[in-house]
Image (cartoon, rainbow, N blue to C red):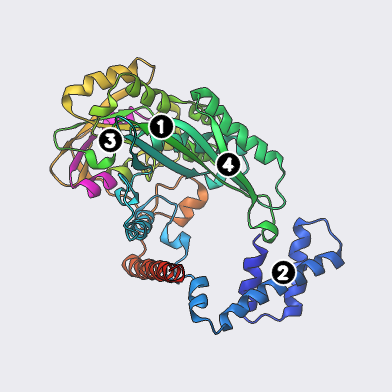
Amino acid sequence: MDIEGFTRGRLTDGEDENELKKILACRIKEFKDVSDEHSLLMAESVIDEVKTTLELNNTDDDFLKELITAPKAGIGMGKMGVGSRGAGDFFVHRKIAEIVKSTNVQSVVDPNAQDDGGVVKVPAKGDDVYVTTAVDGIHSRLSEYPFLGGFHVTRATLRDVCVMGADPVAILSDLHLADDGDVGKLFDFTAGVCAVSELIDVPLVAGSTLRVGGDMVLGDRLVSAVGSVGVSQYPPTARKGATPGDIILMTEGAGGGTITTTALYNGYFDVVWDTMNISFVKASKALFDNDLVKDIHAMTDVTNGGLRGDAHEISSTTGVGLEFYHDKIRSTVAPNVLNMLEDLDIDPLGVSTDSLMLVVPPEIAEDVKKAVSDVGVYITEIGKVDDEGSPRLIKEDGSVEKLVPLFREAAYTKIKKLVGDTTPEDFEIMKEKAQKAADESIRKKDKVIEYILNKEK
C-alpha cells in the first residue's frame, strides 16, 4: 500500500486530518506489528510530511513549481494500456522516443527505432566497437515468485542485446522490495538472475538494492529490473534492416515471464518447466560463432504484443510488407505451450513466445538454419519480406488476414480477460492528451537545461 499517495489524495480532497489519521493508523496496523499509539504517531508523521510538500503549491517561485509539477495527461496507465504491449503501449513508447530525440544526442540505435536495445559506436584502435545496452523489468505478476522473475527477466534483457547482433558481456541487476518484504526475496531473485548468468557464462557485475517507496510503501511487492551490455564489431541488426526479398525465419519459443504467468495463474504448472531454457541465447551464439551476424538484415525477439506487435513495429518502422504463414508460425510454439494457449483461448500471435525471428537475405537462409539447428534449436521459414507495406497472415485455407496489434496483448489471465483488449472509443482523444503531456515535458527539459547553462556561465 502506498501510504504517501493515499494520504496525498485524501488531503487534496479535503479529508479531515483527525479522521485521516485514524484511517491511516488502521491501514498501517494491517501491515505492521505496532501498538495503537505507535501507528498513530506514524500516521501523524506521514500526514505532516505530505502537508509540507503540498505547501510547494503555494510557493512564489513559479519555476520551482513548474519543475516539481508533472504534466497531466488525465489518462491512467491502465486505461492507456501502458505495459500491456498493444497499440496504447506502442503509442506511449513513441512519445518517450520523441523526448529522447529532442536531446539531439546521437546514437546508432535509439528508442525511435522501437527496438528494445540501444546501440552506440565507440571509437577504438582499429575497428570501431558497437556497444549495445538493454534493460527489462520483472513481470509484475511474478513478484511472489522471485526466482522465476529473476530468471526470466535476465533472459529477456539478454535477448534484447542478442537481437542487435551483439555478444553479451555483462549483466546488471536493480532490486526494489517494499518495506515488509522478506529479504529472502532479494536472494531468491538474485539466484534466478545468476542461474542464467552461470548457464551462459556472462557475469553479473553490478546492481542496486532499495525499498519500494522507502518508508512510504507498505507490503512485500517486488519491483525490479535487469540490464545487460553487449559488444559487436559489426553494425547492429536492428529492425530497420528488413529488405524486400528477404526470408523470415523463426526459432521455437516456449515463452518467458508472460507464459510463466499464464501457466501459474491458470493452473498449467507443468508448462513452467518448458520455459526454463536458454535456447534463445544458444541460437544467437551459434550465429556469432558461425560469423553470420554481419549478413543478417534484422533480428527480433517475439515479445512485445506477440508476433502481431513485432510485425506491426517492423513494418511501420521500415515501410516494408511482411507475409507470414500461419501453419509455420504454429510449429514454432512449443507443443505444451501451444496446447495451453489454445485451451485458454489465447491467441498465440498476440502473446510473447520469446522466439528468435530473423530477417535474412535468401542466399544465407540455409546457413542460418543449419547453424541454429546444429545447437539443438528448432528453426523454420515462416514468411518473407515484400513491398506491400503491411504485415499479413496467410491462413491454412488460403485466406489473408492483416496483422494489426490489439489495444492490449492477448489476455492471458482472468483479470486481463475482464479488462479486455478492445480499443477505447476515445483512443484518439487519449492520444492527443498524451501528446500534449509529452510536449510539455520536452519544454520543461529545454527550460531547465537553459537555466543550468546560464547559471554556469
Q: Mark 3 points at which residue?
A: 235
- Count of numbered labels shown in the rendering: 4
- Callout 4 secondary element: strand
Under circle 3, the secondary element is loop
Q: Which amino acid does label 2 sit on?
A: Val
Question: What's under tag 1, amino acid-wise?
Answer: Leu
Q: How crowded is mark 2: few (under 14 residues within 10 Å), some or many (20 or more)?
A: many
* Image-based side of 135 in relation to 37, left or right: left
Mark 1, other Cα within 10 Å: few <14 / some 14–19 / many ≥20: many
* Residues at marks 3 and 2 touching, judged by CB atoms closer than 8 Å: no
Q: Is residue 316 magenta?
A: yes
Q: How far apart are marks 3 and 2 (CA)?
A: 52 Å
Write down the region rendered in magenta: 312-333
Of callouts 3 and 2, the N-terminal one: 2
Name which residue lies at 44% across and 34% down: 158
Question: Helix, strand or loop at disc 2?
Answer: helix
Mark 3: give few (<14), some (14-19) or many (20+) Cα within 10 Å.
many
Indicate the secondary structure of the residue bearing disc 1: helix
The residue carrying mark 4 is 207
User: What residue would you read off at disc 2?
Assistant: 46
Task: Quadrant for the N terminus, please.
Answer: bottom right
Q: Are marks 3 and 1 in contact (CB under 8 Å)?
A: no
Question: Circle 1 sits on which residue?
Answer: 338
- Of residue 23 and residue 128, the one placed in the foreground of this image is 128
> From the viewer's perspective, is 145 left or right of 427?
right
44 vs 324: above or below: below
